[in-house]
Amino acid sequence: MEFRKRPSISWDMLGGRPFRLWRYKELIPIPDDVQIISLGEGGTPLTKLVKSLDQLGLREAYAKFEGVNSTGSFKDRGMTVAMTMAKYLKVPLVACASTGNTSASMTAYASRAGIKPLIVLPKGRVARGKLSQAILHGARIILIEGGFDNALRVILEVSRRGIVYPLNSINPWRIEGQKTIAYEIIDEIGDPDWIVVPVGNAGNITAIWKGLVELKRFGLIDELPRLAGVQTAGAAPLVRAFKMGLEEPLPVENPETIATAIGIGRPVHGSRALRAVRGSKGIFLEVSDEEILEAQRILARYEGLGVEPASAASIAGLKKLREEGIVDRDEKVIAIATGHALKDPDTALLHETTSYEAKDIREALTLIQRLTSA
Ligand code: F0G
């Protein structure tokens, strides 16, 4: 297929609305007669960084802003394909374990498909924006102690028993949709030197690698970019395994991090992700919660991009890769900004601000006069 070619499916299949990700339908191996379940995902901005370049020590860098997908994270890419297949397979009940974004996405797409959603979430570890989405879309919710890894164990068990159709990234259709991030990047700016990805369960980095390898096989790119997988210091099973030369993740019990989205101790795609990163001559590295907050602030205040903490991990990682001389000043780098700042309002509120109170208009006017005359 020629890249940038017009899609072969009719716009009517999507109710006449514009579609973005589905322009790559020929590269997604699903039956031709599916009814596509879409909320207009993909086609996200590849925003050129401008004001933060000095702080990052780079000349050319971009943020792929996945926060503008319809439920506010990159998960919508995999979900449109997986829910399309769930509908095609006529499953009555879909389910997932989630740190929040997968469940927000799954419940929205389940509503669109008319399929009942069930979600298992780690109690006390899901950011409020994400939980409110699941409630809004009408999921049955189970809150479990012991973090995401326990929630996923429950889903794996009920899937094995045939009670639910799982929509975690163990579902191969999720990976098929998610790989389109790679297609879009290459389609838009050719091959970059590095793609920096925040990593939790490792579905996304695995999918991006799959997309890149396919493009190389089709002869659409000559060189494969290097992948950098970023984890947080409190949840770094892949960084530890990478450093020790292991082929499996080194599990972390009770992962703790401000970036709750990637607070995962036993990544299900861990060994695939290790192979992908090594295959790309890339690296796994960790960043601290403080570095994440600093990167979130840089993106918000210098670039106008509001991202959630897990997404800021990619920028924090990029900064570190430059400081350590692993990424060169002249290299072209893409950081994947996986989710929107509104997902986690409580963390956004931690940033320093100046606010004043006025009890009436007069007092507000006096205050402004005083502040602006200084
Ligand atoms: N960034 C955000 C905002 C996420 O929500 C996730 C994963 C990741 C990065 C990491 O992606 O798991 O494919 O390596 N969130 C999952 C969820 C676990 O349940 O929403 P990954």
Image (spheres, rainbow, N blue to C red):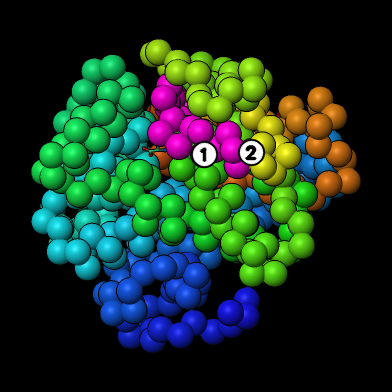
Is ligand 1 less than 8 Å from the beta carbon at label 1?
no
Q: In which quarter of the image is the N terminus?
A: bottom right
Residue wearing tag 1: 272
Residue 108, relative to residue 51: is it above or below?
A: below
SS at mark 1 in the image: helix
Taking the spot 13% from the left edge, 51% from the top edge, the residue there is 93
Q: Which of 209 and 20 is in front in this view?
A: 209
How far separated are the C-alphas under marks 1 and 2?
A: 9 Å
Residue 321, relative to residue 19: is it above or below?
A: above
Taking the spot 24% from the left edge, 18% from the top edge, the residue there is 145
Image location (x, y in percent) of residue 9: 41, 83
Image location (x, y in percent) of residue 6: 54, 84
Q: Label 2 amino acid?
A: Val
Other-residue count near label 2 (Cα within 10 Å), few / some / many at <14 / 14–19 / ≥20: many
Task: Write the start and end of the magenta stretch as one range.
Answer: 256-276
20 in magenta: no
Q: Which of 300 and 111 is in front in this view?
A: 111
Taking the spot 33% from the left edge, 26% from the top edge, the residue there is 148
Residue 79, relative to residue 21: is it above or below?
A: above
SS at mark 2 in the image: helix
Residue wearing tag 2: 277
Can residue 290 be seen in the rendering of this structure? Answer: no
Image location (x, y in percent) of residue 12: 33, 85
- Image quarter for ligand 1 equals top left
Quarter where residue 36 is shown:
bottom left
264 in magenta: yes
